[in-house]
């Protein structure tokens, strides 16, 4: 089974639930601290494709930095490249957990969605 790379913040309770789900379902996972290393431009663009181009969904809209930077009002005026540059420059702006699979991507942890996507993906391998 292929190793899943998951961007997370280790102290985040939602990320802890996601890790527990992965471990309990025997998925090998590479955990990356998103505050130390943000997803790459390539990863952000791939996730964007999976989210039908909805950039806002990739942003951590409840985060302090998002609010301090007033991104709710700035984001609609940004180009896609500007928004991607911002996301890759600071992992605190990226919604977590963030993980990419071969045919889909997952942001945030919703167990039913993860169960459907990951267990369905595992059956294909």
Image (cartoon, helix red, strand yellow):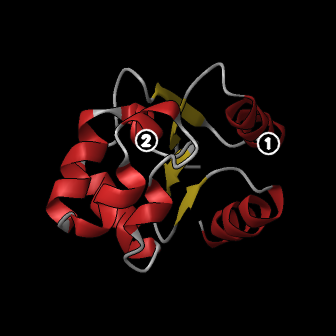
Rendered residue at 43%/41% (across/down): 66
Residue 96 occupies quadrant: top right
Q: Earlier in the sequence, mark 2 or mark 1?
A: 1
Residue 86 occupies quadrant: top left
Within-10-Å neighbours for mark 1: few <14, some 14–19, many 20+:
some
Q: Could you tell me which secondary element the residue under label 1 belongs to?
A: helix
Mark linked to residue 52:
none
Q: Nearer the viewer, residue 69 or 53?
A: 69
Rendered residue at 76%/35% (across/down): 23
Marks 2 and 1 close (CB-CB < 8 Å): no
Residue 111 vs residue 46: left or right? right
> How many dots with numbers?
2
Q: CA distance from mark 2 to mark 1?
A: 28 Å
Q: What residue did someone put label 2 on? A: 66
Rendered residue at 44%/63% (across/down): 56
Q: How far across and down, in percent of the image, does residue 1 sit? A: 59, 49
In the rendered image of this protein, does residue 49 appear above or below residue 59?
below
Q: Quadrant of the C terminus?
A: bottom right
Q: Nearer the viewer, residue 104 or 107?
A: 107
Residue 9 vs residue 32: left or right? right
Q: Nearer the viewer, mark 2 or mark 1?
A: 2
Q: Could you tell me which secondary element the residue under label 2 belongs to?
A: helix
Q: Nearer the viewer, residue 51 or 81?
A: 81
Q: What residue did someone put label 1 on? A: 21
Residue 89 vs residue 65: left or right? left
Q: How far across and down, in percent of the image, does residue 106 sit? A: 57, 58
In the rendered image of this protein, does residue 41 appear above or below residue 29?
below
Within-10-Å neighbours for mark 2: few <14, some 14–19, many 20+:
some
Residue 4 vs residue 90: left or right? right
Most distant residue in the bottom direction? 52
Q: How far across and down, in percent of the image, does residue 21 sit? A: 79, 42
């Amino acid at each position: 089974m292929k190793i899943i790379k998951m961007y997370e913040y280790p102290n985040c309770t939602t990320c802890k639930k996601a890790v527990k789900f992965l471990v309990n379902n025997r998925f090998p996972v590479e955990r990356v601290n998103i505050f130390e290393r943000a997803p790459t431009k390539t990863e952000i663009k791939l996730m964007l494709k999976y989210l039908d181009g909805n950039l806002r969904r990739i942003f951590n809209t409840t985060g302090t930095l998002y609010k301090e930077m007033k991104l709710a009002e700035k984001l609609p005026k940004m180009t896609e490249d500007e928004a991607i540059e911002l996301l890759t420059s600071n992992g605190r702006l990226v919604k977590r957990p963030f993980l990419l699979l071969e045919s889909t991507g997952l942001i945030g942890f919703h167990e039913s969605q993860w169960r459907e996507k990951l267990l369905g993906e595992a059956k294909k391998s």
